[in-house]
Image (cartoon, grey):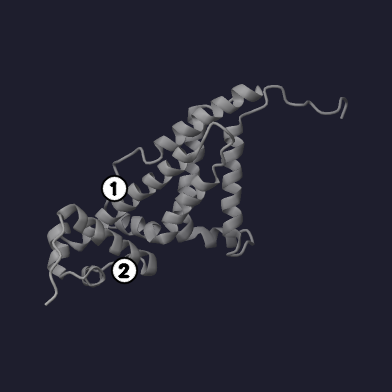
Amino acid sequence: MATRVRRNPEDARRMILEAAGKLLAAGGPAAVQVRAVAAEVGVSDAAINHHFGTRAQLLESLLRFGGAKLKAELHAVLEAWTDGPNDPADLVRALAALYADGYAELALALHRSGRRDTGSGLLDEVVERLHARARRHCAATGRTPPTREALRLTVAALHQAVATDPLFGDEFRRSVGLDTAAREHMLDWWIEVLRTTVAGRNPHPDPGPEGG
């Protein structure tokens, strides 16, 4: 007879959420059923309910789990930066990857069910680190750094774009004659927008040829 492995509640919850995340990525929110998650982990349905209560509570916990995972991934990217040139491409792609794994559909489904996110600060660290980097870079190059508000607006617009892309991106691209393959080009465009914002402005732009 197999020996039952006893896990502490924190480890058990993490394993359940990781299994639910795999199902979410494979089949969207509809695939995250208590029985399917239990089968994935190798526990009973009752064990899932013991840790999360209802399926709705499991889904809400899964959304928070995804947010915490994203925050940790972004922090790791930021910690890998040095005082030299840093490229925000990894930040943009980490953000896009989470929503492409089913979290966009999950957030929409929970919103439709009445859930409203009253939290904040998911990308605060990103804004602060980008602002600090912009000030250092601009001090060295004589450019005018972006304000913190400008970076907040840029990052918020980026976040909105990548969060809604799995839901509506193809439709918006088709509206201007772009195909599905343009998704990668759009991510590249957002990366360039963030690079340009962080680079700041030239305080003395070239006026161009006289009398032009």
Q: Is residue 137 above or below residue 96?
A: above
Q: Are marks 2 and 1 in contact (CB under 8 Å)?
A: no
Identify the secondary structure beneath mark 2: helix
Whole-percent x, y for residue 20 in the image: 29, 63
Determine the image quadrant of residue 31.
bottom left
**Residue type of the residue flagged with mark 1:** Arg
Q: Is residue 77 left or right of residue 7?
A: right
| Chain-order first, disc 2 or disc 1 | 2
Q: Position of residue 126 (x, y in %)?
A: 45, 37
Q: Label 1 belongs to which residue?
A: 116
Name which residue type carries label 2. Answer: Ala
**Residue drawn at (36%, 57%), measured in percent from left and top?**
108
Residue at (30, 60) in percent of width and height: 18
Of residues 112 and 33, the one nearer the viewer is 33
Work out whether residue 16 or residue 8 is closer to the camera in this orientation and state it.
8
Residue at image mark 2: 30
Residue 151 visible in the picture: yes
Query: Where in the figure is residue 52, as x and y percent of width and height?
Result: 17, 58
| Picture quadrant where residue 207 is located | top right
Quadrant where the N terminus sits is bottom left
Secondary structure of the residue carrying tag 1 is loop
Residue 73 location in percent, x, y? 41, 47
Disc marking residue 131: none
Q: Is residue 63 above or below residue 28?
A: above
Quadrant where the image shows the C terminus: top right
- Specify the quadrant of the image occupied by residue 119: top left
Mark 1 closeness class: few <14, some 14–19, many ≥20 residues within 10 Å = few
Q: Nearer the viewer, residue 22 or 10?
A: 10
Is 56 displayed left or right of 194 in the figure? left
Give the Cα separation between the discs numbered 2 and 1: 20 Å
